[in-house]
């Protein structure tokens, strides 16, 4: 049957395309660059948090769907007055909250090129250079970490996505002989996952997404140094096996988000091997620090992991978003994700490496390009030096707290997280100090000069500073403590 002709769409000549003439596009790009440069010019002096209330921000964008477009230069001025003028300043040197790096300039340029080319890095013939670059980045990452050459991997969006990918591969391969890919988990004994109570929340989310059930996730209380005890783990595995359950995966930490603790990876690898379990290492925060010769000993056993989650927008100083899952067996990703389809027929080029056979996504941008450009521009040694500098600054913060009469260090791990408390004149009891330290993060966010969050360790609220920013210097640590002291003294003891 013939398709009826479509009704013609009549547009003014200038609106036939979404493109501006190239000389005008160049002027628009220059105007955009000017906004970025001005933001970077002021980033060292700007407050960490804009301190704007929710109603005000919502009001900036409370409008109906535009039916007609506006001039791009006017639009850039509008974005400059709202989005660019009032960000949370991750790029600056007053951000100590969560695990937030400052990005880097080379990757800003790489992201522009990536968006301009708009390639789909799922199939080789859609993005030949980007496909090869992605595989090179995975190989360089393994080399940077001192891992064997046979490691494979997948570039993903984040550390959370890297954990989900690693656990997906673990489940599919462990239960492959049980038909999990075709029959699902129905009728199987519960598959049990083990980790410490310091493990990132994305692991539990992944367990729920994969249909394993959070009831089958054993959060084992960590030791006083916040690491997982291998002997306690063995007892849990034996108990579950005796109960007729199916232990299948251990999740080890290579740098927890609370304290930067590194689990005893070599011992946990031995437990996994003894029991025929998959060992997944969450190295999203700290895995890349294993590149430091001074820290290699703490990561002994990392090379024995079946899968490793990494997050480049932490200690490779990348703009959001890009992460990586490394696997010891190159073929594991293909066995997990490959599906045939007529519209993906590989024909005479079946031997080419298509990422879509080794990855969940079919449409995906070229995240690896900015990582490739960063390694090329800075070199592995300079990046490692920045990681070492961040760790030294965390030690410096701990020493400052030890030396100050109104602060105390609670813990400083092997990486770049320091947890500490404000104790004022030292006359308050622990319960009142708990109230004060629980109150301070919100008070500091309102103040805006620095951004720091808190956590709870051993049942007590603490301030937690994470130092992952190549722009940080000792003076930024001094400034952090001075602002905390000023806000605490100004606000006084909370009710």
Image: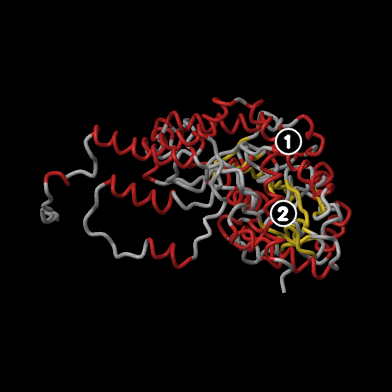
Q: In the rendered view, does 317 fall on the left or right side of 18? A: right
Residue 192 image point, x, y percent: 73, 60
Q: Is residue 372 above or below residue 178?
A: above
Q: Is residue 402 above or below residue 312?
A: below
Q: Residues within 10 Å of mark 2 (few under 14, many from 20)?
A: many
The structure residue drawn at horizontal position 55% and vertical position 54%, both measured from the top left corner, is 49
Q: Residue furthest front?
A: 490
The structure residue drawn at horizontal position 70% and vertical position 59%, both measured from the top left corner, is 454
In the rendered image, which quarter contains the N terminus?
A: bottom left
The structure residue drawn at horizontal position 23% and vertical position 39%, both measured from the top left corner, is 20
Residue 469 image point, x, y percent: 63, 40
**Residues under labels 1 and 2: Cα distance?**
22 Å
Secondary structure at badge 2 equals strand
The label number, if any, that marks residue 290 in the structure image: 1
Residue of label 2? 464
Q: Can residue 312 be seen from the camera position used here?
A: yes
Numbered marks: total: 2
Q: In the rendered view, does 56 fall on the left or right side of 417? A: left
Q: Can residue 228 be seen from the camera position used here?
A: no
Viewer-side label of 1, 2:
2
């Amino acid at each position: 049957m013939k398709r009826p002709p479509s009704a013609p769409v009549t547009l003014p000549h200038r609106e036939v395309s979404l493109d501006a003439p190239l000389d005008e596009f160049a002027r628009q790009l220059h105007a955009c660059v000017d906004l970025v440069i001005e933001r970077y010019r002021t980033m060292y002096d700007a407050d960490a948090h804009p301190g704007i209330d929710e109603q005000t921000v919502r009001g900036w964008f409370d409008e109906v769907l535009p039916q007609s477009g506006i001039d791009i230069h006017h639009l850039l001025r509008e974005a400059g007055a709202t989005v660019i003028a009032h960000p949370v300043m991750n790029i600056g040197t007053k951000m100590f909250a969560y695990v937030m790096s400052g990005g880097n300039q080379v990757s800003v340029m790489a992201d522009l090129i990536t968006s301009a080319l708009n390639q789909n890095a799922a199939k080789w013939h859609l993005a030949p250079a980007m496909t090869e670059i992605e595989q090179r980045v995975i190989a360089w990452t393994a080399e940077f970490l001192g891992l064997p050459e046979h490691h494979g991997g997948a570039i993903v969006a984040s550390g959370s996505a890297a954990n989900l990918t690693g656990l997906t591969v673990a489940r599919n391969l462990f239960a492959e002989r049980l038909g999990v890919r075709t029959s699902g988990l129905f009728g199987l004994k519960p598959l049990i996952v083990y980790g410490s109570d310091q493990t990132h929340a994305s692991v539990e989310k992944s367990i729920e997404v994969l249909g394993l059930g959070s009831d089958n996730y054993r959060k084992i209380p960590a030791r006083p140094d916040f690491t997982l005890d291998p002997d306690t783990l063995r007892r849990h595995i034996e108990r579950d096996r005796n109960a007729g359950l199916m232990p299948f995966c251990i999740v080890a930490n290579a740098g927890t988000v609370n304290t930067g603790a590194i689990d005893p990876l070599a011992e946990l690898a031995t437990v996994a091997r003894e029991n025929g379990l998959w060992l997944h290492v969450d190295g999203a925060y700290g895995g890349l620090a294993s590149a430091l010769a001074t820290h290699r000993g703490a990561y002994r056993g990392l090379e024995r992991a079946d899968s490793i989650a990494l997050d480049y927008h932490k200690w490779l100083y990348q703009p959001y978003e890009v992460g990586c899952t490394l696997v010891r067996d190159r073929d594991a990703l293909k066995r997990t994700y490959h599906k045939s389809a007529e519209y993906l027929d590989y024909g005479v080029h079946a031997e080419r490496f298509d990422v879509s056979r080794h990855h969940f996504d079919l449409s995906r941008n070229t995240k690896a390009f900015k990582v490739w450009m960063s390694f090329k521009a800075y070199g592995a040694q300079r990046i490692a030096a920045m990681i070492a500098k961040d760790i030294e600054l965390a030690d410096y913060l701990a020493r400052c707290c030890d030396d100050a009469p109104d602060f105390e260090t609670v813990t400083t791990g092997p990486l770049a997280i320091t947890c500490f408390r404000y104790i004022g004149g030292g006359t308050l009891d622990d319960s009142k100090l708990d109230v004060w330290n629980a109150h301070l993060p919100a008070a500091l966010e309102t103040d805006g000069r620095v951004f720091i969050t808190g956590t709870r360790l051993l049942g007590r609220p603490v301030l937690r500073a994470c130092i992952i920013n190549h722009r940080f210097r000792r003076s930024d640590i001094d400034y952090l403590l001075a602002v905390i002291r000023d806000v605490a003294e100004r606000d006084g003891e909370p009710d």
